[in-house]
Image: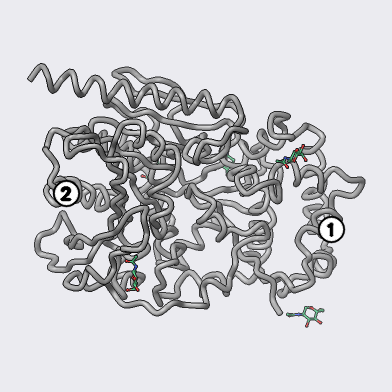
Amino acid sequence: MKATVMAVVCVAACLSIRASAISPYGLERSRFHKKRLWNSVDVNDLHKYDLDDDPQGYCGYLTQPMDHFDPLVNKHFNQRYWVVDKYWKSKSHPVFLYEGAEGELLLDEVANGHHAEMAQAHGALILGFEHRFYGNSTTKEGLLLSELQYLSSQQQLADLSVFRVFAEKKLGMSGTNTWIVIGGSYAGALSAWFRLKYPHLVYGSVASSAPVRAQANFEGYNEVVAASFADPIVFGSEQCVASIRQGFGKIEQMKQAGELAQIVKDFNTCQNMTDPNDFKTFASDLQGNFMSAAQFNQVEGNVSSIGSLCQQMMVPDPYQALVKMFNSGNCLDVSFKDFLTMLTDVTFDPGDFYRQWFYQTCTQFGYYHTCDKNTTCMFLPEVDLDYYFAWCKGGYNIPSFDVLEQVNFTNAYYGADNPTGTRVVFVDGTIDPWHALSVLKDLPEGLKSVFMKGTSHCADMHPSLPGDAPALKAGRLEIEKIVSGWLMQAEMEKRQK
Ligand SMILES: *[C@@H]1O[C@H](CO)[C@@H](O)[C@H](O)[C@H]1NC(C)=O
Ligand SMILES: *[C@@H]1O[C@H](CO)[C@@H](O)[C@H](O)[C@H]1NC(C)=O
Ligand SMILES: *[C@@H]1O[C@H](CO)[C@@H](O)[C@H](O)[C@H]1NC(C)=O
Ligand SMILES: *[C@@H]1O[C@H](CO)[C@@H](O)[C@H](O)[C@H]1NC(C)=O
Ligand SMILES: *[C@@H]1O[C@H](CO)[C@@H](O)[C@H](O)[C@H]1NC(C)=O
């Protein structure tokens, strides 16, 4: 039997529900092979999809054009939204628009978390909006290249604008409601961009862990990972970093010395790694474990937290610690060919997101977690930009030049980490590797930053717990103050009219 490890990349996703696709030992490949039956949703039969029995809320669908920008494309799809109205005081009370990210958006995520606590405090309605091409918001052909061309952040923001206008009518709102858009990770970037590009539709935006600067060679990710593993605030230390470097250094040394067969034997890889991309896939699997510990530190308890990985690595022989961590008894599948087979599989399942998300990285954002020699990265200096370009080429036939060009376009179009606009709060954590692409200080005109010590990806979005770190509690309070301020200001402006 083959083990469940496969080229790991931390996707720009917030919640541990989705993070579970990145298991402590890598991607669970089985999920790509057990397909649920998929039929596209029939809007004429929508009552069927209402979850009457869920007291948290219900869902609906909205028919959208496949291409908002080309009226000659006569194709449509149905996009899912969620309504959580248990806190909504009146048809004039505020609306919190919760933007979905690169994955299925489920009711639990929409109905719970810090934004729901704020909605309760302000008597607000919560609306969740699933991203096109993910979850139920797509068609059976959604993974074909001919359809993926309609998957972009620009199309999604246009979807959101249509939904914003539709929902106001559909739910009989007074029309004087103050709208706040909220999201985390990639959806955090979308949330900021929606306020910046469509300021007439939403009054403010909370953008958590939002990588608003696109970058092909995202070296900063693993530099932050190294800094986080050295940070005592999360049970890291300089000794821990030294041990990790020593463990990975030994692998690199063995490879240089021509001892690949020994690595194959120790780590029980299914392939002999004669293809350089197999070795890079192996390197990517290994680093992925540490990357997700930094990104989701302690979100899922201590199992793969920085503290527990440090405990495992700070032993006399860190190389053996790595072997122990990855050699589960089953052989480790590091075949790049198998990985591309997965990436090019076009049979759709609502739980899928890899093929769509990597398409988005190749066509808009890059965000590739490289480990270049000339950086402070602790891992094997194998996972380079060319490795990821091989994904774009092998998965979608997109050449590297196009990736670089599109990344430049994304930054020109949205303003990268120096946008201009008003009433967006960027929320980040020092431990979260994604903060390197976000806005970390207040910008002129009322763009705010809340940068919390010791927190990981989207930590502020989780429901508040009594045991939360003081920095996290203070960060949430600051967000609440900013949002309350906006809502008050909006009321004053309405009275003056
Ligand atoms: C999502 O789509 C599937 C397939 O059509 C359907 O069975 C399911 O009920 C839908 N779920 C929701 C919550 O709409
Ligand atoms: C790997 O190499 C060993 C020794 O050279 C050989 O016995 C084995 O069949 C090879 N395995 C694969 C999967 O190619
Ligand atoms: C997590 O691990 C750290 C370091 O090993 C330990 O000190 C801490 O008490 C653990 N926290 C929980 C909640 O178990
Ligand atoms: C490191 O080297 C790569 C090429 O190998 C280059 O693209 C990158 O800009 C360099 N990074 C730094 C921080 O110098
Ligand atoms: C992207 O922008 C960078 C920085 O301005 C520039 O050096 C590079 O040539 C651009 N690349 C492409 C493909 O447009």
**Residue at the left extreme, as displayed:** 497
Helix, strand or loop at disc 2?
loop
* Colour logic: one colour
Task: Looking at the picture, tell me which residue is in the foreground, 194 or 394.
Answer: 194
Observer able to see residue 387: yes
Between 344 and 107, the one lying in front of the other is: 107
Rendered position, 495 above or below 229: above
**Where's residue 469, x and y in %?**
61, 29
| Whole-percent x, y for residue 407 in the image | 38, 46
Q: Amino acid at mark 1?
A: Ala
* Residue at image point 63% right, 61% down: 26
**Of discs 1 and 2, which sits in the foreground?**
2
Q: Judge whether 99 appears above or below 477 on screen.
A: below
Q: Please, what secondary structure does the residue beneath circle 1 have?
A: loop
Q: Is residue 366 left or right of residue 243?
A: left
Q: Which residue is mark 2?
A: 171
Determine which residue is flagged by label 1: 257
Is 389 placed above or below 318 here? Answer: below
Q: Residue at x 45, y 33 (%)?
A: 438
Residue neighbourhood size for the residue with mark 2, other residues' Cα within 10 Å, grouped as few (<14), some (14–19), many (≥20) = few
| Residue closer to the observer: 478 or 223 | 478
C-alpha distance separating marks 1 and 2: 68 Å
First in residue order: circle 1 vs circle 2: 2
- So how many labels did they put on this image? 2
Say which amino acid is labelled 2.
Leu
Regarding ligand 2, which quadrant of the image does it lie in? bottom right
Check the picture and name the quadrant holding the C terminus.
top left
Quadrant in the rendering for residue 327? bottom right
